[in-house]
Amino acid sequence: MKYTISLFILIAVTFFFVGSGIAADNKYVGVKTCSMCHKSDAKGNQLKVWNESAHAKAFTTLTSEASAKIAKEKGLKKPASESPECLTCHAVTADAKLLDKGFDVKDGVQCESCHGAGSNYKAMGVMKDKVKAIAAGLTEYKDEAAIEKQCKTCHNEKSPTFKEFKFKTMWDKIKHPAKKS
Protein backbone atom coordinates (compact mmCIF):
# COMPACT_ATOMS: atom_id res chain seq x y z
CA MET A 1 0.00 0.00 0.00
CA LYS A 2 2.83 2.37 0.97
CA TYR A 3 4.54 1.74 -2.39
CA THR A 4 1.28 2.23 -4.28
CA ILE A 5 0.78 5.67 -2.72
CA SER A 6 4.42 6.59 -3.41
CA LEU A 7 4.07 5.44 -7.02
CA PHE A 8 0.83 7.43 -7.39
CA ILE A 9 2.51 10.58 -6.03
CA LEU A 10 5.50 10.09 -8.33
CA ILE A 11 3.21 9.71 -11.37
CA ALA A 12 1.12 12.75 -10.36
CA VAL A 13 4.22 14.92 -9.88
CA THR A 14 5.63 13.73 -13.22
CA PHE A 15 2.39 14.62 -15.05
CA PHE A 16 2.33 18.02 -13.34
CA PHE A 17 5.83 18.91 -14.49
CA VAL A 18 5.42 17.42 -17.96
CA GLY A 19 2.06 19.20 -18.34
CA SER A 20 3.59 22.48 -17.19
CA GLY A 21 6.36 22.03 -19.74
CA ILE A 22 3.84 21.66 -22.55
CA ALA A 23 2.57 25.20 -22.09
CA ALA A 24 6.04 26.57 -21.38
CA ASP A 25 7.54 25.39 -24.67
CA ASN A 26 4.45 26.01 -26.79
CA LYS A 27 5.30 28.42 -29.61
CA TYR A 28 3.12 30.75 -31.64
CA VAL A 29 2.94 29.32 -35.14
CA GLY A 30 0.85 32.04 -36.81
CA VAL A 31 -2.33 32.26 -38.81
CA LYS A 32 -0.76 30.74 -41.93
CA THR A 33 -0.19 27.47 -40.08
CA CYS A 34 -3.67 27.49 -38.53
CA SER A 35 -5.27 28.30 -41.88
CA MET A 36 -4.06 25.08 -43.48
CA CYS A 37 -6.86 23.20 -41.69
CA HIS A 38 -9.31 26.01 -40.98
CA LYS A 39 -10.10 27.32 -44.45
CA SER A 40 -12.57 24.83 -45.89
CA ASP A 41 -16.32 25.33 -45.86
CA ALA A 42 -16.67 21.73 -44.70
CA LYS A 43 -14.80 22.58 -41.47
CA GLY A 44 -16.41 26.01 -40.90
CA ASN A 45 -14.00 28.27 -42.81
CA GLN A 46 -12.69 30.09 -39.75
CA LEU A 47 -10.00 31.71 -41.91
CA LYS A 48 -12.61 33.52 -44.01
CA VAL A 49 -14.36 34.83 -40.88
CA TRP A 50 -11.04 36.09 -39.53
CA ASN A 51 -9.91 37.60 -42.85
CA GLU A 52 -13.13 39.61 -43.06
CA SER A 53 -12.81 40.87 -39.49
CA ALA A 54 -11.16 43.90 -37.94
CA HIS A 55 -8.92 41.46 -36.03
CA ALA A 56 -7.07 40.63 -39.26
CA LYS A 57 -6.37 44.33 -39.76
CA ALA A 58 -5.60 45.19 -36.13
CA PHE A 59 -1.83 45.58 -36.61
CA THR A 60 -2.29 47.56 -39.83
CA THR A 61 -4.41 50.14 -37.99
CA LEU A 62 -1.37 50.90 -35.85
CA THR A 63 0.48 52.12 -38.95
CA SER A 64 -2.16 54.75 -39.79
CA GLU A 65 -1.89 58.51 -39.32
CA ALA A 66 -4.73 58.36 -36.79
CA SER A 67 -2.75 55.88 -34.68
CA ALA A 68 0.39 58.02 -34.94
CA LYS A 69 -1.65 60.98 -33.65
CA ILE A 70 -3.08 58.95 -30.74
CA ALA A 71 0.39 57.63 -29.83
CA LYS A 72 1.75 61.17 -29.80
CA GLU A 73 -1.19 62.45 -27.71
CA LYS A 74 -0.61 59.64 -25.21
CA GLY A 75 3.07 60.52 -24.96
CA LEU A 76 4.32 57.21 -26.30
CA LYS A 77 8.04 57.13 -27.09
CA LYS A 78 7.67 54.83 -30.12
CA PRO A 79 5.27 54.65 -33.07
CA ALA A 80 2.01 52.83 -32.27
CA SER A 81 3.14 49.80 -34.32
CA GLU A 82 6.15 49.41 -32.01
CA SER A 83 4.61 50.42 -28.67
CA PRO A 84 3.83 47.66 -26.19
CA GLU A 85 0.86 49.71 -24.98
CA CYS A 86 -0.72 49.33 -28.44
CA LEU A 87 0.65 45.96 -29.50
CA THR A 88 -0.75 44.20 -26.46
CA CYS A 89 -4.22 44.38 -28.06
CA HIS A 90 -3.40 44.75 -31.75
CA ALA A 91 -1.12 41.73 -32.13
CA VAL A 92 0.24 38.68 -30.36
CA THR A 93 2.96 39.87 -28.03
CA ALA A 94 5.32 37.22 -26.74
CA ASP A 95 8.99 36.70 -26.12
CA ALA A 96 10.80 36.19 -29.45
CA LYS A 97 11.82 32.68 -28.27
CA LEU A 98 8.14 31.73 -28.37
CA LEU A 99 7.58 32.81 -31.98
CA ASP A 100 7.92 30.08 -34.60
CA LYS A 101 9.55 30.90 -37.94
CA GLY A 102 6.14 31.15 -39.69
CA PHE A 103 4.73 33.63 -37.19
CA ASP A 104 4.22 37.24 -38.33
CA VAL A 105 3.22 39.93 -35.82
CA LYS A 106 1.80 41.95 -38.73
CA ASP A 107 -1.04 39.43 -38.98
CA GLY A 108 -2.62 41.26 -36.04
CA VAL A 109 -5.11 39.64 -33.69
CA GLN A 110 -4.84 36.14 -35.07
CA CYS A 111 -5.98 32.69 -34.00
CA GLU A 112 -3.50 32.29 -31.18
CA SER A 113 -4.40 35.66 -29.65
CA CYS A 114 -7.47 33.93 -28.25
CA HIS A 115 -6.71 30.22 -28.62
CA GLY A 116 -3.15 30.18 -27.20
CA ALA A 117 0.19 29.31 -28.75
CA GLY A 118 -0.38 26.40 -31.10
CA SER A 119 2.80 24.47 -31.75
CA ASN A 120 1.83 21.67 -29.37
CA TYR A 121 -1.77 21.31 -30.51
CA LYS A 122 -1.56 22.08 -34.25
CA ALA A 123 -1.17 18.44 -35.34
CA MET A 124 -4.29 16.95 -36.92
CA GLY A 125 -4.28 14.01 -34.51
CA VAL A 126 -4.31 16.37 -31.55
CA MET A 127 -6.85 18.84 -32.96
CA LYS A 128 -9.34 16.05 -33.69
CA ASP A 129 -9.43 15.24 -29.97
CA LYS A 130 -10.58 18.28 -27.97
CA VAL A 131 -9.28 16.87 -24.68
CA LYS A 132 -5.83 16.30 -26.19
CA ALA A 133 -5.84 19.76 -27.80
CA ILE A 134 -6.69 21.45 -24.50
CA ALA A 135 -4.04 19.40 -22.69
CA ALA A 136 -1.55 20.56 -25.35
CA GLY A 137 -2.33 24.25 -24.78
CA LEU A 138 -5.51 25.11 -26.72
CA THR A 139 -7.42 27.64 -24.65
CA GLU A 140 -10.86 26.37 -23.75
CA TYR A 141 -13.81 28.67 -23.12
CA LYS A 142 -16.55 27.04 -21.07
CA ASP A 143 -19.29 29.40 -22.27
CA GLU A 144 -19.99 32.79 -23.85
CA ALA A 145 -19.36 34.55 -20.52
CA ALA A 146 -15.78 33.26 -20.61
CA ILE A 147 -15.42 34.38 -24.22
CA GLU A 148 -16.78 37.82 -23.35
CA LYS A 149 -14.30 38.11 -20.49
CA GLN A 150 -11.45 37.33 -22.91
CA CYS A 151 -12.72 39.89 -25.43
CA LYS A 152 -12.91 42.55 -22.75
CA THR A 153 -9.20 42.20 -21.97
CA CYS A 154 -8.80 44.51 -25.00
CA HIS A 155 -12.26 45.88 -25.71
CA ASN A 156 -12.45 48.05 -22.62
CA GLU A 157 -12.16 51.61 -21.31
CA LYS A 158 -8.35 51.48 -21.30
CA SER A 159 -8.35 51.77 -25.09
CA PRO A 160 -7.94 55.37 -26.26
CA THR A 161 -10.57 54.78 -28.96
CA PHE A 162 -13.00 52.75 -26.84
CA LYS A 163 -16.65 52.87 -27.73
CA GLU A 164 -19.31 50.85 -25.97
CA PHE A 165 -18.56 47.15 -26.48
CA LYS A 166 -21.70 45.18 -27.30
CA PHE A 167 -20.49 41.63 -26.89
CA LYS A 168 -23.46 39.82 -28.45
CA THR A 169 -23.38 42.00 -31.57
CA MET A 170 -19.62 41.73 -31.97
CA TRP A 171 -19.51 38.01 -31.16
CA ASP A 172 -22.05 37.35 -33.92
CA LYS A 173 -19.59 38.98 -36.35
CA ILE A 174 -16.53 36.98 -35.31
CA LYS A 175 -17.72 33.61 -33.97
CA HIS A 176 -16.36 30.77 -36.00
CA PRO A 177 -17.43 27.34 -34.81
CA ALA A 178 -15.80 24.30 -36.27
CA LYS A 179 -18.20 21.99 -38.03
CA LYS A 180 -18.20 18.43 -36.77
CA SER A 181 -16.82 15.95 -39.23
Image: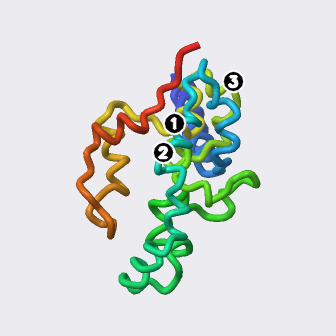
The spot of residue 105 in percent (x, y) is 62, 60
Q: Earlier in the sequence, mark 1 or mark 3?
A: 1
**Residue depicted at x 45% and y 35%:** 140
- How many angstroms separate mark 2 from mark 3 (CA)? 29 Å
Q: Position of residue 7 (x, y in %)?
A: 58, 29
Residue type, label 2: Ser
**Cβ atoms under marks 2 and 1 closer than 8 Å:** yes
Residue on which disc 2 sits: 53
Q: Nearer the viewer, mark 1 or mark 3?
A: 1
Please state if 109 lies on the left or on the right of 73 as rendered: right
Q: Earlier in the sequence, mark 2 or mark 3?
A: 2
Residue labelled with disc 1: 49
State whether residue 7 appears in this view. Answer: no
Q: Pointers 2 and 3 in contact (CB under 8 A)?
A: no
Disc 1 + disc 3, Cβ < 8 Å: no
- Name the secondary structure under disc 1: helix
Label 3 sits on what residue type?
A: Gly
- Give the CA distance from mark 2 to mark 1: 6 Å
Dot 3, how many residues are within 10 Å of its Cα: few (below 14), some (14-19), or many (20+)?
A: few
Percent x, y of residue 68? 47, 78
- Provide the residue designation for mark 3: 125
138 left or right of 175? Answer: right
- Give whichever of 97, 36 is nearer the camera: 36
- Of discs 2 and 3, which sits in the foreground? 2
What's the residue type where badge 1 is placed? Val
Quarter of the image where the C terminus is located: top right
